[in-house]
Image: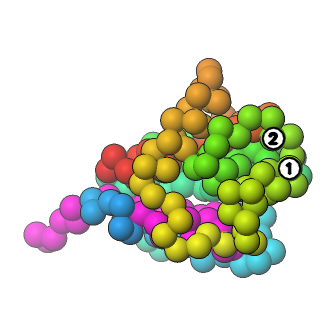
Amino acid sequence: MGRRRYVRLFVIAAEGFKTEPQYFRLFRDMSSTARVFCIKGNQNSSPLQALKRMRDHLATNTLGRSDEAWLVVDKDQWTDEQIRELHDWSTTGANYSLALSNPNFEYWLLLHFEDGAGVADGNACVLRLRKCLPNYDKGIPSGIISREMVEEAIRRAKRRDTPPCEDWPHEPGSTTVYRLVGKILSA
């Protein structure tokens, strides 16, 4: 009683083991009114494992009224049926959401550097990203991404998500991670 958290919490269960947690750590310095917590995963993760980690976390941790729980996954080789289960979960709570990158999270990273047009698959995406980050290997060098770059990535992703998808991006070259990142920055 008498204790109130003024910082908005974003709980993230990501499919990725390394890149996504590193990326979302960037927001520790970019926002003083949002806290981002990534639930730890493992190297052999899948979208359904991310969902299980989120469910397990929420079973023992209560979200505040303004807090949000997000699944962050790739389309990769996963079927629509597998992704649908995550989308269905995201509709069960007002503060539950799904952010998906098609083909992969690297596409979202690429948008920090360029418009991402013409990306057909995950390999092409990583090759393009390596032109911007020559030593990229599932890790983000510290200090390489600025707030301005994040804001530009949001603008680029919004332009590519027209009209806005209602479930998840079905075609390569699209992502809804910008929705989560925009909320973190505006919290």
Residue 121 can be seen, yes or no = yes
Q: Is residue 131 left or right of residue 92?
A: right
- Would you say residue 5 sits in the magenta stretch? yes
> Given contact means CB atoms under 8 Å apart, are the residues at marks 1 and 2 in contact?
yes
Q: Residue at x 45, y 45 (%)?
A: 151
User: Which numbered circle lies on residue 119?
Assistant: 2
Q: Nearer the viewer, residue 171 or 107?
A: 107
Q: Say which residue label 1 marks.
A: 124
Crowding at label 2, few (<14), some or many (≥20) Cα neighbours within 10 Å?
Answer: many
Residue 34 located within the stretch drawn in magenta? no
Q: Quadrant of residue 116?
A: top right
Q: Quadrant of residue 27?
A: bottom left
- Observer-nearest of 173 and 145: 145
Residue flagged by tag 1: what amino acid is it? Ala
Vertically, is 150 above or below 47?
A: above
Q: Callout 2: helix, strand or loop?
A: loop
Q: Position of residue 11 (x, y in %)?
A: 48, 63
Between discs 1 and 2, the one toward the N terminus: 2
- The residue stretch that appears in magenta: 1-27
